[in-house]
Image (cartoon, rainbow, N blue to C red):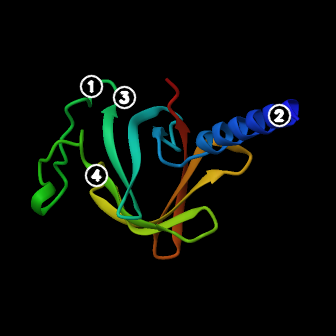
Amino acid sequence: MKYHKLLLFFIGLFLINFSYGQSIFDEWKTIDDRTGKPKGIIKIYKKDGQMYGDIVKVLEEGKENFKCTKCEGDLKDAPVLGMTIIKGAEDDGDGEWKGKYLFDPEQAMTFRCKIWLNPDNPDELKVRGYLAFIYRTQTWIRVKD
């Protein structure tokens, strides 16, 4: 009987660790889908049941202090570091998050988005931005400590 309880305990620990590793809420290294080079680190978090994402580190050499010069309004000349680039995305119930605010500070453009974990590799985040019927998908890589 003791072995049965011990086995259930270890299975429970494994399942908790497995589900934690597959969380979308983490830090992600963005990879430019055109050049293949890392651009920055985005912290994805949940607030009031919605997904948000902030730039927490700029990885491109020489762009650490990049400002949004093409932006308008409150974002005009704002530092990219610390900028919220994903706002208010909602879980559709199938592990995909969809929203109307995915901001690209280099282009100063806002896109609709769909974000999901790669089903074949939970350390890859698929981020798709839509502009009308045109879309582009990037693969972001989970940052490991």
Q: What's under tag 2, amino acid-wise?
A: Leu
Marks 3 & 4, CB-CB < 8 Å contact: no
Q: What's under tag 1, amino acid-wise?
A: Gly
Q: Which of the 4 image quarters holds residue 21?
A: top right
The residue tagged with tag 2: helix, strand or loop? helix
Q: How many marks?
A: 4
Q: Which of the 4 image quarters holds residue 27?
A: top left
The residue tagged with tag 4: helix, strand or loop? strand
Mark 3 Cα shell of 10 Å, populated few (<14), some (14-19), many (≥20)? some
Disc 3 to disc 1, C-alpha distance: 9 Å
Q: For the residues carrying marks 3 and 2, which lies nearer the camera in this image?
A: 2
Please indicate, yes or no, whether residue 53 appears anywhere in the rendered image. yes
Q: What's under tag 4, amino acid-wise?
A: Thr
The residue tagged with tag 3: helix, strand or loop? loop
Could you tell me which residue is drawn at 43 percent across and 69 percent down? 99
Residue 46: give x, y in percent of width and height: 40, 55
Residue that carries the numbered disc 3 in the rendered image: 59
Sequence-wise, the earlier of marks 1 and 2 is 2
Residue 32: give x, y in percent of width and height: 48, 41
Q: Is residue 43 above or below residue 134?
A: above
Could you tell me which residue is drawn at 32 percent across and 24 percent down? 61
Disc 4 to disc 2, C-alpha distance: 44 Å
Marks 4 & 2, CB-CB < 8 Å contact: no
The residue tagged with tag 1: helix, strand or loop? loop
Residue that carries the numbered disc 1 in the rendered image: 62
Sequence-wise, the earlier of marks 1 and 4 is 1
Disc 3 to disc 4, C-alpha distance: 17 Å
Please indicate, yes or no, whether residue 104 appears anywhere in the rendered image. no
Residue that carries the numbered disc 4 in the rendered image: 84
Sequence-wise, the earlier of marks 3 and 4 is 3
Disc 1 to disc 2, C-alpha distance: 53 Å
Residue that carries the numbered disc 2 in the rendered image: 7
